[in-house]
Image (cartoon, coloured by chain):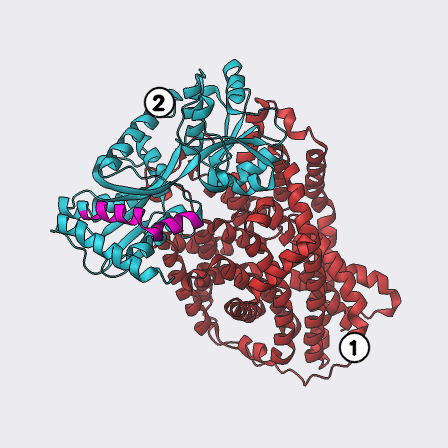
Chain colours: A cyan, B red
């Protein structure tokens, strides 16, 4: 705590530097952050925790107010941003892979990823594929081999809808492992990861697909064996024992990133200011502390690369969704 | 021993000053709402849900407050039964039988005090039962696969009308209405939108909380406006309390038996509190034999149903917390609340949200003490509040409902929906179609559908999977019994209840 003031000073100093480069835009007054869901979920967390750190780092002049705007899995907030506040340069909207998935599958009718500005990511939750502790599958290749012989051999349970992110992670991994006939792989959709895991631990469904943060409870109790984490490299801390899919020869990445978009018609200066602000935030010790406390993993495509990342992700998801026949 | 540790942690949560304050407030408001004739606990909790959102409470605080409301409403139900001979809700009906005669004999204060003590004992026994049984059952929940869950939901629907359901056809109609509303939104199993007509607001379906508040709270206001019952009730006189230790000792065995019976009937999904109070009253009558003066103002006749219905109300939390299947209308409302806080009932909840679950259980224990302390000295206050004209009360309820619903998602569309549900609720009431099955249909319908489809996916379309395990066969058997028995036994029981309710 005693470190706080000098850190704040440092952050403020580095901000003046970056602001010195951008110059033209400075936020004034209140900044809004829309969480496109009810209080308590991931987007709500993104807004509230980022808002707090932005305030602590003096990256915003006043306070950041979180506004919950649930509906259509983020669609209501997306439509609101595009149609009603298209030039509001003090409005951040929390987003994640769920947002890009819905965009890719055309579930925000009449809207596309080009309608907004993608600002930056502040971390991610990585996908895992797991089985019950007494399952016959000991590693990911064994599970994938079974699918190659018969795509119906392994049934997956996940917390998203059919075609949602948890389902797509299975398909991404199976695709990379060379399994044909992706649409045949059975996917059972539950209300959330917890329910899905309970079915896997209870021995009713073969495998679980979800995020590492969800799997933590049953992993620690020993009921769940995580076959692979879908990350570029092993995760830090207590997760370092879990092998990645990549090191098992299946180059599948499933990052459920958390970040922000802003309205589409803001000035370039304003856009640059917020891209820099998110960069500064991501590198700060305050944010590292938040990430550690909440099990958020490193993920931050560098300056200006986030927009490209989002668009590539949307293209990939579109291709997969077409392959399984979810969209035409 | 884990249970004990968790419970101690739970007390830590529940005894935090702000949580305690909200528990006290909930207990007070709950008693008040339970006492208003015709409202009842399900409505009471539904009306107070928006308050939790208006105040921006944390999940555990909100749940603690609403659990206290729940317990309080069960206590409050007896006040109007005893003093006015109007039961606040169905479970309180049996309390009229001996409570009202006692009040007419000038022993209203004693009847109120005895019912408070019996309620306390009933709740206490059932809460201990909940503490012992819930963690076991939560582990047992792992044996429930898709087929077993499907059978369990069928069971919940089959026993929906229960033994006291007045008109089975209307109950089925109401449940079907709930099921229909539940189909709106994205279909999880195929990812396809159903009945959304391209409206973004409908993509995630209709929010339970909005439906509940609209159906119960807003329609209450409409019914009131129509009746213009602004005059308030005449003052009811309550004598000075002269309760002796002997009077309490006399009702102790009755209360213990009532609590146990109530708990067991509460645990069965669908059966609920009405059954608990009814069975414990009739059983007690048999046990006491010729020694009883039931129906003429016997204090044990007040104690038995009160212990029974309070026992059942805690018992109904067992299937709700462990399996996510509500045992009664009120627990259905609490379940909707849990879901809106992103907390999923089941084995995981007992470890991942231990603070919430055990906080709530501890709050139930503390709430009961609070209620006992509140109820004996303050009974005069509640009686006075009974005579507050609804013309002051209902506008406040409506205001809280609007502010609360708006503060959840800041969407005016939600308010339109709430009003629409209020109007629908008004017409349903006019047609005497019960509202609770609508909510249960909305809550249970999607789960039932999902589990049926999962069972089919797992078995590759083989229907036999639905009755392939001993557990699912047992559940089917209970479901069939629950469906058939009321048709045979129901009319007989209802006739007896009616005969009992009008002793003259």
For disc 1, the chain is: B
User: Quick one: SS at disc 1?
Assistant: helix
Can residue B350 be seen from the camera position used here?
Answer: yes
| Residue picked out by circle 2 | A322
A45 horizontally vs B379: left or right: left
Direction from residue A25 to residue A209 in the image, left or right: right
- The percent coordinates of residue B11 (x first, y second) are 60, 63
Q: Which residue is mark 1?
A: B247
Q: Mark 1 touching mark 2, by CB under 8 A?
A: no
Identify which residue, B453 or B157, lies in the foreground: B453
**In the rendered image, the vertical position of residue A321 relative to residue B502, given as above or below:** above
Q: Quadrant of the N terminus of chain B?
A: bottom right
- B479 w.r.t. B426: above or below: above
User: Callout 2 environment at 10 Å: few (<14), some (14 to 19), or many (20+)?
Assistant: some
Query: In which quadrant will I find the C terminus of chain B?
Result: bottom right
Residue appearing at x 68%, y 59% in the figure? B127
């Amino acid at each position: 705590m005693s470190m706080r003031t000098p850190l704040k000073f440092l952050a403020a100093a580095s901000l003046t530097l970056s602001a010195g480069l951008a110059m033209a835009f400075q936020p004034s007054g209140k900044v809004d952050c829309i969480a496109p869901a009810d209080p308590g979920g991931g987007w709500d967390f993104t807004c509230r925790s980022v808002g707090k750190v932005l305030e602590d780092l003096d990256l915003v002049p006043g306070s950041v107010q979180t506004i919950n705007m649930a509906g259509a899995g983020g669609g209501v907030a997306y439509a609101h941003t595009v149609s009603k506040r298209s030039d509001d340069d003090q409005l951040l909207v929390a987003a994640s892979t769920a947002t890009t998935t819905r965009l890719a599958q055309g579930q925000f009718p009449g809207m596309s990823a080009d309608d907004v500005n993608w600002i930056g990511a502040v971390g991610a939750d990585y996908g895992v594929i797991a089985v019950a502790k007494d399952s016959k599958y000991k590693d990911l290749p064994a599970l994938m081999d079974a699918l190659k012989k018969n795509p119906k051999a392994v049934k997956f349970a996940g917390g998203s809808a059919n075609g949602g992110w948890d389902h797509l992670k299975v398909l991404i991994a199976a695709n990379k492992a060379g399994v044909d006939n992706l649409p045949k792989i059975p996917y059972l959709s539950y209300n959330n990861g917890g329910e899905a895991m309970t079915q896997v631990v209870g021995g009713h469904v073969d495998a679980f697909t979800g995020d590492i943060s969800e799997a933590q409870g049953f992993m620690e109790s020993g009921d769940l064996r995580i076959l692979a984490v879908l990350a570029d490299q092993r995760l830090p801390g207590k997760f370092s024992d879990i092998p990645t899919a990549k090191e098992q020869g299946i180059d599948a990445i499933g990052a459920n990133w958390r970040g922000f978009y802003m309205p589409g018609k803001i000035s370039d200066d304003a856009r640059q200011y917020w891209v820099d602000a998110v960069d500064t935030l991501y590198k700060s010790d305050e944010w590292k502390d938040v990430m550690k406390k909440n099990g958020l993993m490193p993920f931050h495509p560098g300056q200006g690369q986030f927009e490209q990342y989002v668009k590539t992700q949307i293209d990939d998801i579109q291709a997969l969704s077409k392959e399984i026949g979810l969209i035409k | 021993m884990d249970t004990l540790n968790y419970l101690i942690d739970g007390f830590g949560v529940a005894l935090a000053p702000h949580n305690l304050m909200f528990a006290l407030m909930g207990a007070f408001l709950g008693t008040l709402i339970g006492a208003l004739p015709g409202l009842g606990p399900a409505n009471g909790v539904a009306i107070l849900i928006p308050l939790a959102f208006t105040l921006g409470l944390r999940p555990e605080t909100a749940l603690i407050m609403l659990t206290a409301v729940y317990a309080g409403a069960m206590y409050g139900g007896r006040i109007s039964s005893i003093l006015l001979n109007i039961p606040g809700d169905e479970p309180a009906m049996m309390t009229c039988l001996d409570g009202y005669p006692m009040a007419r004999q000038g022993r209203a204060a004693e009847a109120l005090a005895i019912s408070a003590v019996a309620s306390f004992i009933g709740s206490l026994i059932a809460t201990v039962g909940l503490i012992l049984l819930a963690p076991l059952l939560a582990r047992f929940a792992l044996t429930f696969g898709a087929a077993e869950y499907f059978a369990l939901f069928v069971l919940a629907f089959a026993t929906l009308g229960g033994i006291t359901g007045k008109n089975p056809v209307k109950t089925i109609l109401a449940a079907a209405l709930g099921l229909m509303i539940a189909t709106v939104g994205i279909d999880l199993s195929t990812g396809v939108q159903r009945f959304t007509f391209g409206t973004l607001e409908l993509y995630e379906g209709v929010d339970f909380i909005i439906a509940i508040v609209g159906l119960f709270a807003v329609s209450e206001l409409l019914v009131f406006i129509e009746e213009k019952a602004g005059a308030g009730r005449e003052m009811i006189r309550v004598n000075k309390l002269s309760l002796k230790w002997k009077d309490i000792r006399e009702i102790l065995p009755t209360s213990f038996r009532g609590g146990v019976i109530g708990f067991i009937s509460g645990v069965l999904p669908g059966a609920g509190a009405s059954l608990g109070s009814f069975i414990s009253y009739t059983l007690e009558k048999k046990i006491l034999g010729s020694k009883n003066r039931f129906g003429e103002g016997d204090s044990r006749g007040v104690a038995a149903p009160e212990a029974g219905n309070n026992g059942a109300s805690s018992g109904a939390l067992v299937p709700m917390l462990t399996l996510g299947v509500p045992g009664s209308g009120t627990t259905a409302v609490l379940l909707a609340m849990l879901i809106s806080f992103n907390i999923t009932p089941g084995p995981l909840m007992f470890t991942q949200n231990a603070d919430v679950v055990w906080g709530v259980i501890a709050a139930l224990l503390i709430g009961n003490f609070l209620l006992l302390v509140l109820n004996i000295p303050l009974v005069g206050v509640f009686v006075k509040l009974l005579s507050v004209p609804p013309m002051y009360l209902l506008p406040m309820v409506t205001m809280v409902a609007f502010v609360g619903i708006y503060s959840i998602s800041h969407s005016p569309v939600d308010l339109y929906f709430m009003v629409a549900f209020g109007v629908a609720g008004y017409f349903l009431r006019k047609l005497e179609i019960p509202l609770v099955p609508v909510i249960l249909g909305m809550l249970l319908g999607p789960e039932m559908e999902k589990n049926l489809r999962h069972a089919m996916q797992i078995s590759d379309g083989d229907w036999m999977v639905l009755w392939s395990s001993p557990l699912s066969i047992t559940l089917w058997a209970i479901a069939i019994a629950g469906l058939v028995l009321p048709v045979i036994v129901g009319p007989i029981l209802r006739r007896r209840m009616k005969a009992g309710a009008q002793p003259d």
